[in-house]
Amino acid sequence: MSIINSEDAVSESIGTILAVAITVALAAIIAVFVFGMANEMQDTYVVGVSAKFVDEEIRITYHGGPDHDKLQRLDWRIFNSTGAKYNGSPTDKWLQNPKVGDTFGTEGHSTANPFGPGTYRVQVIASFPDNAQQLMLDTYLDHT
């Protein structure tokens, strides 16, 4: 009885698997360009926004960023812990073409709907010239 010690089959199997993997990856890359998927992506913009409670109001501050010159508008949405939207005006003068350091928020919008204790979700959406809207801030603030 003789034992044959050969590793040829292992090397050939690994080589075949690698060749198939490279072929599939190249086919996927070519398909992206042929079918135009790469052109349908929207630009991603970068600007900084923060939110915090100041006394009994939520104050949103615009910090600027690399795409400051392209920013046209900032809108805010605030939800309480049950998901109900805060009843405030979306037409605050600071929303249009904000400057670095500008603040806006709930101050003076509604005294009939004060913030009680709880957690509030704050979202800030930015609008840009190509009709793109991008969520710039999505955070939770605790109010005691």
Image (cartoon, grey):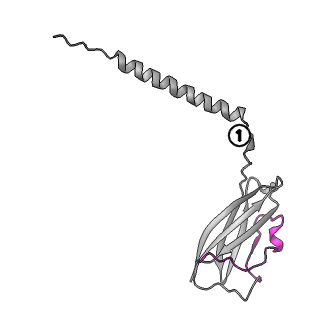
Which is more toward the observer, 72 or 23? 23
Q: Vertical placement of 74 versus 54: above or below?
A: above
Farthest residue toward the bottom?
Answer: 112
Amino acid bearing label 1: Met
For residue 112, which quarter of the picture? Answer: bottom right
Judged left or right of residue 45, residue 144 is: left
The magenta span reads: 82-108
User: Which residue in the protein does label 1 denote?
Assistant: 37
Q: Vertical placement of 23 versus 125: above or below?
A: above
For residue 113, which quarter of the picture? Answer: bottom right
Quarter of the image that includes the C terminus: bottom right
Q: Going 69% across and 61% down the picture, which residue do you hit?
A: 136
The spot of residue 103 in percent (x, y) is: 75, 72
Q: Going 73% across and 66% down the picture, which residue do you hit?
A: 62
Task: Identify the main secondary structure in magenta.
Answer: loop
Assign a secondary structure to mark 1.
Answer: helix
Q: How many marks?
A: 1
Crowding around mark 1 (Cα neighbors within 10 Å: few <14, some 14 to 19, many 20+) is: few
For residue 73, which quarter of the picture? Answer: bottom right
Farthest residue toward the top?
Answer: 2
The spot of residue 87 in percent (x, y) is: 73, 80
- Residue 95 among those drawn in magenta: yes
Which is more toward the observer, 115 or 28? 28
Which is more toward the observer, 24 or 137? 24
Q: Going 71% across and 32% down the picture, which residue do you hit?
A: 34
Which is more toward the observer, 98 or 123? 123
The spot of residue 98 in percent (x, y) is: 80, 65
Q: Vertical placement of 90 versus 2: above or below?
A: below
Q: Vertical placement of 33 versus 88: above or below?
A: above
The spot of residue 11 in percent (x, y) is: 39, 19
